[in-house]
Image (cartoon, rainbow, N blue to C red):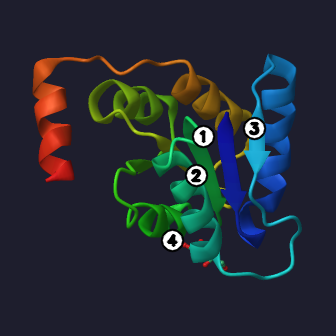
């Protein structure tokens, strides 16, 4: 189950990502917001982060205008490793090296075509499970 969350700046891009998830058969839970009226991104970052940290959802995707504020908010929740990615290299690397459990995107930064490729890379790349990466993640948790 993928947790989705966004503010008004991420709403339109979320619709494109939902199309991709539907096409590929991914299950998701949409924590809002549900339109383009101005709202506060920390609320939605927290909802998705809690859903992932509790195990209710395996991974999350968060979108605000830049992806910055909503990833900062999500990373306040223990156990969350939210990674803001602007290309597929970052999405692959953050899964391989950081075992990132939330992808953050900027709805005003990346176009829908690139965003969907970033999501595809993020969801289809497994953690490398190498000792040095596990050690560094444990250091983050400490
Ligand atoms: C909202 O205008 C904007 O500040 C927000 O979407 C995000 O970019 C914050 O980091």
Residue displayed at 83% across by 56% down: 12
Label 2 vs 4, first from the N-terminus: 2
- Tags 1 and 2 touching, CB below 8 Å: yes
Q: Position of residue 38 (x, y in %)?
A: 79, 82
Q: Residues within 10 Å of mark 4 (few under 14, many from 20)?
A: some
Considering the image in quadrants, where does the N terminus appear?
Answer: top right
Q: Position of residue 63 (x, y in %)?
A: 64, 57
Res 69 label: 4
Q: Position of residue 103 (x, y in %)?
A: 53, 44
Q: Secondary structure at mark 1?
A: loop
Q: Residues within 10 Å of mark 1 (few under 14, many from 20)?
A: many
Q: Quadrant of ligand 1?
A: bottom right
Label 4 vs 3, first from the N-terminus: 3
- Tags 4 and 3 touching, CB below 8 Å: no
Label 1 vs 2, first from the N-terminus: 2
Quickly name the residue at label 1: 57
Q: CA distance from mark 4 to mark 3?
A: 22 Å
Rendered position, 19 above or below 54:
above
Q: Quadrant of residue 40?
A: bottom right
Q: Is mark 2 within 8 Å of ligand 1?
A: no
Quickly name the residue at label 3: 28
Residue displayed at 35% across by 32% down: 99
Quickly name the residue at label 2: 51
Q: CA distance from mark 3 to mark 1?
A: 8 Å
């Amino acid at each position: 189950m993928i947790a989705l969350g966004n503010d008004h700046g991420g709403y339109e891009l979320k619709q494109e990502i939902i199309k991709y998830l539907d096409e590929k058969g991914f299950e998701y839970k949409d924590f809002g917001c549900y339109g383009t009226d101005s709202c506060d991104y920390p609320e939605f970052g927290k909802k998705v982060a809690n859903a992932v940290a509790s195990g209710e959802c395996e991974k999350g995707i968060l979108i605000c205008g830049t992806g910055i504020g909503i990833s900062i908010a999500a990373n306040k929740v223990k156990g969350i490793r939210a990674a803001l990615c602007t290309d597929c290299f970052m999405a692959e690397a953050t899964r391989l090296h950081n075992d990132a459990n939330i992808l953050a995107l900027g709805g005003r930064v990346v176009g829908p075509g690139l965003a969907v490729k970033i999501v595809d890379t993020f969801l289809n790349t497994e953690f490398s499970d190498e000792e040095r990466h596990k050690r560094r993640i444990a250091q983050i948790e400490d």
